Image (tube, rainbow, N blue to C red):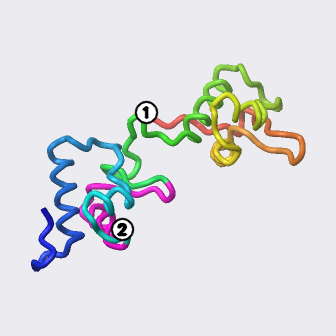
């Protein structure tokens, strides 16, 4: 229960409750910390207070935030459970796997936006986010009004060990 009248700020109290959940293993490495909206409802706090909770957890080294995705337990780069990987990254990973397996060849089109939308049951914006993710990594390139193609193998990211 929050002590709203005491000397400890509410955001620090909520952050301590989340820290306790992390220490107990209720929130494991890479798992999402409750979102700002969830914190607002669960603890009856304001959005700015919820933001301060996330900042406090980051400052304590317990969590990291990815803009537009959320705050996650652990240090930046901590792998997330498969069920918490954003859909656009799941789509991108599937296409990357097909490229690496030789199913999608360099300088050949990958499935269209419409095909990917239908296959994954997602909006066009999600497919475009997946394509931007793959482009940023060097797996594909887009030709305006023609489509997205597999990049030449020399453009692919190098494996890291």
Is disc 2 surrounded by few (<14), some (14 to 19) or many (20+) residues within 10 Å? Answer: some
Residue 29 coordinates in the image, percent (x, y): 30, 43
Looking at marks 1 and 2 on the same chain, the residue that comes earlier in the sequence is marked by 2
Tell me the magenta residue range: 48-68
Residue 134 in sight here: no
Residue that carries the numbered disc 1 in the rendered image? 82
Question: Which quadrant holds the C terminus?
Answer: top left
For marks 1 and 2, give the one nearer the viewer.
Answer: 2
Count of residue discs: 2
Seen as rendered, the residue at the extreme right is: 145
Q: Is residue 68 left or right of residue 115?
A: left
Contact, mark 1 vs mark 2 (Cβ under 8 Å) = no
On the image, numbered disc 2 is attached to which residue? 51
Q: Which residue is pictured at 79% across the width and 39% down the height?
A: 148
Write down the quadrant of residue 70 in the picture.
bottom left
Residue at 36% across, 68% down:
51
Q: Quadrant of residue 53?
A: bottom left
Is residue 6 one of those drawn in magenta? no
Report the residue at 17% width, 61% height from top. 16
Mark 1 is surrounded, within 10 Å at the Cα level, by few (under 14), some (14 to 19) or many (20 or more) other residues, namely few
Q: Is residue 149 placed above or below 6 in the rendered structure? A: above
């Amino acid at each position: 229960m929050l002590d709203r009248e005491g000397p400890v700020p509410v955001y620090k109290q909520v952050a301590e409750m989340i820290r306790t959940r992390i220490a107990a293993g209720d929130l494991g490495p890479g798992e999402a910390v409750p979102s700002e909206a969830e914190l607002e409802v669960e603890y009856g706090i304001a959005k700015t207070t919820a933001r301060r909770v996330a900042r406090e957890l980051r400052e304590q080294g317990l969590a990291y935030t990815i803009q537009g995705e959320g705050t996650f337990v652990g240090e930046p780069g901590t792998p997330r459970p498969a069920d918490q990987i954003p859909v656009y990254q799941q789509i991108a990973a599937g296409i990357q796997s097909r490229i690496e397996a030789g199913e999608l060849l360099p300088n050949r089109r990958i499935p269209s936006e419409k095909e990917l939308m239908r296959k994954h049951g997602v909006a066009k914006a999600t497919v475009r986010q997946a394509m931007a993710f793959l482009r940023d990594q060097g797996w594909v390139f887009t030709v305006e009004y023609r489509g997205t193609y597999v990049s030449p193998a020399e453009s692919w990211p190098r494996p890291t060990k």
